[in-house]
Each structure stands twice: as structure tokens, then as C-alpha cells.
Amino acid sequence: MNSIAQQLKAKFEKAFTAAFGESYAGADPMLAAASNPNFGDFQCNAAMSLGKKLGKPPRAIASTIIENLDITDICETPEIAGPGFINLKLKPAYLEAQISAIAGDSRLGIEPAKTPQTIAIDFSSPNIAKEMHVGHLRSTIIGDAIARILEFQGHDVLRINHIGDWGTQFGMLIAYLREVHPEALTTADALDLGDLVAFYRQAKQRFDTDETFKETARQEVVKLQAGAEDTRRAWKLLCDQSRREFQVIYDLLDIKLTERGESFYNPLLPAVVEDLTNLGLLVESDGAKCVFVDGFTNKEGEPLPLIVQKTDGGYNYATTDLAAVRYRIQKDNAKRLIYVTDSGQANHFAQVFAVAKKANWIPEDVEIVHVPFGLVLGEDGKRAKTRSGDTVRLRDLLDEAIVRATKDLEDRLVTEERQETKEFVANVGRVVGLSAVKYADLSQNRASNYVFSYDKMLALQGNTAPYMLYAYARVQGIRRKGEIDFENLDAGAKVILQSDAELVLAKHLLQLSEVINAVEGDLLPNRICQYLFELSQKYNQFFEQCQVLKSEEPLRTSRLILCDLTARTLKLGLELLGIQVLGRM
């Protein structure tokens, strides 16, 4: 079912053709939500721009448009305001019919994409032998939400985890462990991941100061690349251990990913260099093989190269990213490539994409997008750190959220003199804690930094996950109290929209498809958060102003339909954000 805005736009396009000729068939009606509800629901602002083209006063243009506009089934009689704005007010009967239609649809009236695509989303991407930290939070949560939204729209989504599992760091770590903890290279889980991280730091310090050790580490890299059995076995053990730790967090957050680490693309790197050489794009600079692309300069204003092969013959991130671009287009047949990483990598990806385009590796029908995000800040406004100055471990952050949510619930149970089982408390604490973290992140414009505050994200009021979850639970409370079977409400019951609160709620419920279509394009999940927040507010106003269970029929069933549709909309919207709902809190 097309959204109200889409239906109105089609009506205006017909009116333009009838009024001004075929050449105006595609003219933009410049339709917008009315700035003041007293003037109606929508406003057409096209008369001013058409007036300039047609050489007539905008009000006269607006009058001509209305004469040719057939919207009697949707709107009251249009009104002209100011210099030529056309104000439109939706008919209650039209809204009632639209609500009835989506109430009987499992997708709530949201049509799948007309041309489904294969879409590759690169997100999360932690590094082996390092713990996931707060910096991985945004990539993981934003990437998952985007994947869920695109999957709901019917696209074939490849959820790619481009982990750091190859390169110099492994030679360095393996060389160090051979000296200080050799059993870690032959025995699974001989070390905790935290100890492995500490050894990694020590190895890096040694690598930077000890030339003999640096050469030993490089030899281990050569052995790894050559497939030496003991080095390969050590590398696999380290990777497997890190993977298991990552999976604990992914399971906690309900994140699905397909791992394709840097090692996956390693066999493809020589071909990248060879093809760039054959295309005449590679230039030798200080012994390294590079590609120069117009528009990229360093701080001194000098041309900035993308290094594809280092002076020692090794490869780097750029080489791997170029190989990944080619693989995703040529092998996966992806038509849209999405990279969810922090804003600091924007220049790197811009260069990689520019080189790939210069090499003609990106066809005209393929879109490649970097989805940048800002920093997670502590309440002091600085990059989130522990008291000791270390990066906050993601597992610690999530565990703390669950502990605090559980404590809030336990305190509330005491205040309400309410008894619940340990299982209930544990489940609600887990769901609310994790939902609060996810929602707090996703409700921000992803390009912005945001302050991480447990108190704010766990608040029962405001644009928070607990507020949304309470709105959903409130509907379930009506179901239990009235012993209502929402799935078997009278299928022929008429929706009746009498009060302002009912009309406001109904109009908002009908906007979900517009919001999801917008996010499908601009990849800004915060639009869904804002929509759900406003829906929860409007439902709570409806709940306070309109009797539901005590209403007489047929109003009672009509209002139950509105309650059920609100709950289903909240559930769908939250599921698209990776958030689980609760029947009771």
C-alpha cells in the first residue's frame, strides 16, 4: 500500500498534467507535512515555483491546480493560504479505511522493495587478539539495524564481518609468544583473551624498539604467508580463541554475521596489483607502489597517494579493501556496498572508492557508500575511557547496563510491593539493559558524537528504550485485563476515529512506511527511533484521553484495533533496531 504522501503526490501529478500540459507531468508537488496542524495535514508548495515558469500569480496557479485535483476520496476541500500554499486536511473516513487495511496486513501496509538487490554490508570488524571495546559498539549496532531494515524490505543482505586476522601483527605476536608462553601456540585457550591482549601490547613495544625481534617477527609473517605448519596452527588457535570471545558478545546482542577477514582476501592481492599495473595506474613513490587520485592531498597540500604495495613487497589495508570491493561486485554480485565505520576512516574509504572507480571496477549500476559514525563520549565529554585511561571493554559496558537495569527493576518491585520470579527479573533486566544501550546509540544521528550515560538511557521517560517498551507493555496489560485475543478481533469491525487523540494516533500509524523507505535510502536509523518515540507519546495521550475496555461497542473494538496496531508497529520498529519487546515490565 502506497503511503498517504505517495498517494497525494500521484494525484497532484495528474492535476499538473491536466492543468498545464504533458510537459508538467513530472513536476514536483513539493508536498510537505503542514507546519501548523490547525491548517491541515499536508501542504502543497508548488504554486510559487510554477508561477515563475508560467508567468502567473501563485494564487491563480493554486486555484487552477485545485480545479483539476481529484482528491475527494482522501481530503476535505483544499484551501489556499498566503501567497499560494494549498492546505490539505485528511478525511476521517479515509483514515479509517487506511487503518483497517493495514490492521489486516502482517507487514502493516509496507510494500517490499520493487527491485530487490544483493547488498553487502561491512560492519563490526574487530581485530584478532584484541578485545572488542566501546569503539566497536556503534559499527556493530548501526550495521545490524541497517541490515535488518534492508532485509525487511526484501533485499538479499550479506552481513560481512571484515575482521583483522592477517598481517604483521601476527608475526609479532607469534614471535613473542614463542619466547614467553609457547604453549599458547599449541594448546587451545592456554591464555585468557585479556592476557593475550596484554602480550600483544608487550610484543608491539618490543617490535618498536628491538631490531632483532622485529626481524624475527617479519620472518614469522613470511612463514605464515608461506603456509608453514606450526605458524599456521598457532595463527588458527589465536583466531579461534578471539572468535569465541567475539561470539559471546554477538550472541548477547543478537547479531548475525558472516566472517570474511583480511586472510580471506589475501590470495587475491597480487591480482589487484597486477591489474592496476596493467591499467597504468600504479606509480612508484619512495619504493612503494601507489595510485594517485585527483583531490586527495596531505596536510602540506601535496598529492596524497594510496599505497597498494609497500617497499618490502607487503600489502596493506588499502590493498585488501580494493580486493574486497572487487570480490563483492564480481563474485557476490552486490549492487550496493555499504561500509559502517567511524568517521576517521572517511578519507581512507573515499580514496579506495576513487581508485576502484578509476580502475573501472565499479559498474554504473553499483552504489558504494561509506556510513560514518561519531565517537562514544564519557559523561565528561571526552572519548569514553576507564578510570585507568584504558578503552572501555564492550563486554564490561553491556554487563554494567544489565546490572543497572536489573537493580532499577528490583527497586521498583519493592516500591510497588510486587513479587516476581528470579527468572522474570533476570530476563527483564537483560532485555531492558541491552535495549537501552542499543537504542541510546541508534537514536542519535550516527554522524554525531554522543555522551554515553546509563542514567539517561535507562530512564523511564524521554526518548529511551524503556519508554518504548512500556508503551508496548501497556497494550499487553489491556489484553490481559480485558482477556482480549487481538488476533481474533471482529474482522469486519469498523474503525471509528472520533476524538482528536484517535485521529492523531491514526495519522502517525500510517507514516511508518514513509519512514522505513527514507531509512532504506539514507541509512539513518535514528529516523525510526524518532518515529517510535512520537508514536509512544501519541499512544499514551490516546490511552489517557480515551476509554478502551469500558467503551461501548462498536467504539470498544475500534479502540482495541488501534491499541493492537500500535503494539504491532512498536514491535516491528523495535525489531528493525534489534530490540526485543516485553509483555510485562
Image (cartoon, rainbow, N blue to C red):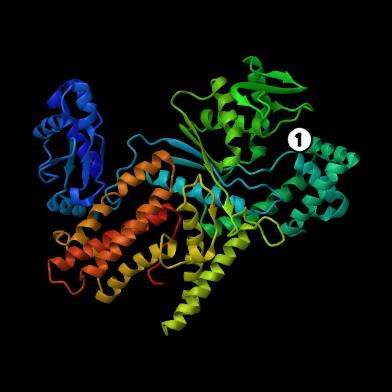
The residue shown at (22%, 32%) is 46
Which quarter shows the N terminus?
A: top left
Q: Position of residue 543 (x, y in %)?
A: 26, 68
Residue 308 % position (x, y): 68, 27
Q: Quick one: 267 or 473, which is closer to the camera?
A: 473
At 46% from the left and 47% from the top, the residue drawn is 445
Q: Position of residue 514 (x, y in %)?
A: 31, 44
Outermost residue on the right side: it is 212
From what the image shows, is residue 236 above or below residue 430? above
Residue at 51% x, 62% y is: 434
Q: Is residue 355 visible?
A: yes
Quick one: which residue is furthest to the bottom in this view? Answer: 417
Horizontally, residue 69 falls left or right of residue 316, namely left
Residue under numbered circle 1: 225
Q: In the depicted view, which residue is nearer to us: 182 or 163?
A: 163
Q: In x, y percent, where is residue 456?
A: 49, 63
450 left or right, relative to 564: right
User: Mark 1 is on which residue type?
Assistant: Gln
Quick check: 418 above or below 518? below
Neighbor class of circle 1 (other Cα within 10 Å; few <14, some 14-19, many 20+) is some
Secondary element at tag 1: helix
Q: Nearer the viewer, residue 14 or 87?
A: 87
Quadrant housing the C terminus: bottom left
Reply above or below: 400 against 274.
below
Q: Is residue 70 above or below residue 480?
A: above
